[in-house]
Image (cartoon, rainbow, N blue to C red):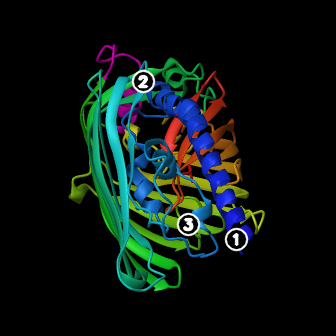
Amino acid sequence: MDLKCKDVARSGEHKSERLKQLSRILRALLVPLFLCIYINASSQVETHVDTLKTDSSRFQIPKTSTENLNEQYDIGDLATDIFHPNRPAGPPRKKSGITIIPNIASNPTIGSQIGIKAVAGRKLGTDPATYMSVAATSASITTKGIIYFYVNHNIFTNANKWNLQGNLVAAKTVTPDFGLGIGHADGSTEEDKVLTNPARVGRVLQSLFFNFREKLYKEIYKSVFVGAGVSFDIRSKIQQRAVAENALTPYNIYNNKYGFDPGSYMSNGLLFSIQYTSRDNQNRAYKGIYADAGIRMNQTWMGSTKGALQLTSDFRKYLRLSTNHPEHVVAFWNWGSYLISGALPYLELPGTGRDPGSRSGRGYTVGYFKGTKYNYSEVEYRFPITRNKFLSGVTFFHLQTANNDLGTKLFEQWQPGGGGGLRVLFNKATRTNLCLDYAFGRYGRKGFFLGLNEAF
């Protein structure tokens, strides 16, 4: 018995020493790395877009109980080892569902940015199958005067009978613009050449942006929801930086063609959708399916500048490659948005990074490719790096296609992109990852992209 106790004590001492060594190594390597990431990462942005805007809609309590969180190591554990290395071992403490991250970036478009992002979650009700209700918020300001603020919520009532999703956004924005279509020249006039912009000449649009969106879903069958809601998207004081008022630009050409005021617009409409989800976790799924099909009906009686009918589709499939190591996953994603009738404002056209989470098309800025009809496909392989799940990695490849209303139709021309990334386990209770990706595309597009949770 004494020998056995000594062995246990000796084993505990070795384990403690290993943790101290790990702490010292991580202090030396990871803390400077995070500082460099936060300060120098140039994000994939229409610079007002914040990838946390919809992170809350992806929080869900894991349906599987096979995960042993005590064997996993996250940023909270790292902080404990760094700041409280001699804290005595005790019973496992319940992990918080709150994640807070600095919102710091720097690039030539936005200057230097400082802010904060936060998401928090709590399960409402007593039914163990109830999904987690969450809220998210972010506020940031840049040296070039860009201001962005949002509040977002995704609430599930007991047993998931009802789901309320919504967000409020107020921003002073900067939007890079590269014309209409997929980078393929069409038409015969000078206006057609400027509009399709095959040389991918960049321009910049500034505006004030306000959005209010609210949807109410009802579960009608296990994992099947139907929903309806409203969305108000309002832009004002739209200006083209360093461009004469009547200059020949894609923005001016499009507005003249479809009769939009170049200084402001409203895009307000009704939302209807049907959704199916069987993902085991909405932050980082190991298995399951997510599918959503919806229509948006912009209505002039609601104040919309033009009427429009739009169809959207979103399909995601997750294949777990190993039961013992479920972090090995191949994930598939297809997202599309298609104008059926009417007209959309130029800055509301579907395109790169215009999906609900603003995470598609890594390697390009938001709106780099766009059209009245747009489709996006991506495949990603996710894999663990360390045994304690603290570090993991991804590699991904995607294709996007769009029409341009001048001859090129949807699915006729494609543009590729891809890359790889590092994941740091930020909160093991909710499978929240800090994601740092390096991605590249055509026309010399490339860069680092920082966000919380997987792209899809």
Q: Residue 266 in the image: x percent, y percent?
A: 26, 46
Q: Give the mark nearest the N terminus, 2 or 3.
A: 2
Give the foreground label among 1 and 3. Answer: 1
- On the picture, is 83 further left or further right than 434? left
**Three-letter amino acid code at the position of disc 2:** Ser
Q: Is residue 14 magenta?
A: no
Residue type beneath disc 1: Asp
Instruction: Report how far apart the C-alphas of labels 1 and 2 lie in the structure.
Output: 60 Å
Q: Which residue is mark 2?
A: 106
Position of the C terminus by quadrant:
bottom right
Pick whichever, 443 or 301, lies toward us: 443
Query: In the figure, 10 relative to 66: above or below?
Result: above
Name the residue rendered at 47%, 29% in the picture. 35
Q: Are marks 1 and 2 in contact (CB under 8 Å)?
A: no
The question of residue 246 being in magenta is answered with yes
Say which residue label 1 marks. 2
- Alpha-carbon span between mark 1 and mark 3: 45 Å
Mark yes or no: residue 290 visible.
yes
The reply to whether callout 2 and callout 3 are in contact (CB within 8 Å) is no
Q: What's the residue at 76%, 69% (across, down)?
A: 323
Q: Position of residue 448 (x, y in %)?
A: 56, 30
Left or right side of 172 for 279: right
Q: Nearer the viewer, mark 1 or mark 2?
A: 1
**Labelled disc at residue 281:** 3
User: Which mark sits nearer the N-terminus, 1 or 3?
Assistant: 1
Q: Which residues are magenta?
A: 240-258
* 77 with respect to 247 (left or right): right
